[in-house]
Amino acid sequence: MTEKFVQTISSVNYNKGVFSLYFVGQDQKSMANGVMAESDNELELKQVVHMPASGFMYMVSMIKNMLEDPRMGEEFDKLVAAGFLPAGDAAESTIQESVREENTTAKNSAPQAKK
């Protein structure tokens, strides 16, 4: 097995029950010389991972649980304070909002006990 460092995911595609995740990163030679990518155009495709819908949904569930953990929130706060993440990141707000909506939907659609 080989491990590969990637900076982010550029897209997720779904076709006939299979999800494809496209991971991108900066050229390692540039990084080794201290040159950081200044735009997404400087990122290159590093790896494509294909997985069945069940595996993808399990992964999403694991990430959702991790984001709901208060310890993870503390880690994000530390990264923001250190300047590694921008404060008030729109992506973080979107993730938190979708988690809240999912929790609300799950509570509202939970089967009611028969009396």
Image: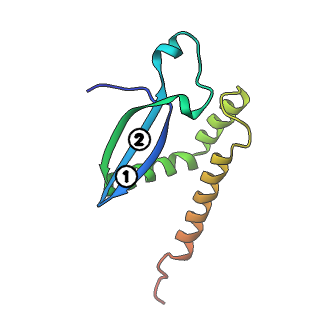
Vertical relation: 18 (above or below) 69:
below
In-image side of 40 versus 47 (left or right): right
51 sits left or right of 37 in the view = left
Q: In the image, which disc is placed on residue 31?
A: none
| Residue 22, numbered label | 2
The foreground one among 72 and 93 is: 93
Secondary structure of the residue carrying tag 2 is: strand
Looking at the picture, does residue 10 appear above or below residue 32?
below
Give, as a three-letter code, the residue at label 2. Answer: Tyr
Residue 13 located left or right of residue 7: left
Determine which of the numbered discs, if any, sits on residue 56 in the image. 1
Q: Quadrant location of the N terminus? A: top left
Residue sitting nearer the eye, 36 or 90: 36
> Does label 2 or label 1 sit earlier along the sequence?
2
Identify the residue at the far left of this view: 1
Residue drawn 60% across the image and 52% down it = 95
Q: In terms of depth relative to the viewer, which is nearer, 75 or 23?
A: 23
The image quarter in which residue 73 lies: top right
Label 1: few (<14), some (14–19) or many (≥20) C-alpha neighbours in 10 Å? some
Q: Is 113 left, or right, of 93 in this rendering? A: left
Q: In the rendered view, tell whether residue 103 sits above or below residue 60.
A: below
Where 69 falls versus 44 (above or below)?
below
Q: How crowded is mark 2: few (under 14 residues within 10 Å), some or many (20 or more)?
A: some
> Which label lies toward us, 2 or 1?
2
Q: Where is residue 79 in the image (x, y as percent from the top left)?
A: 66, 30
Residue placed most toward the observer, 39 or 73: 39
Q: What residue type is labelled 1?
A: Phe
Q: Residue at x 52, y 15 (%)?
A: 30
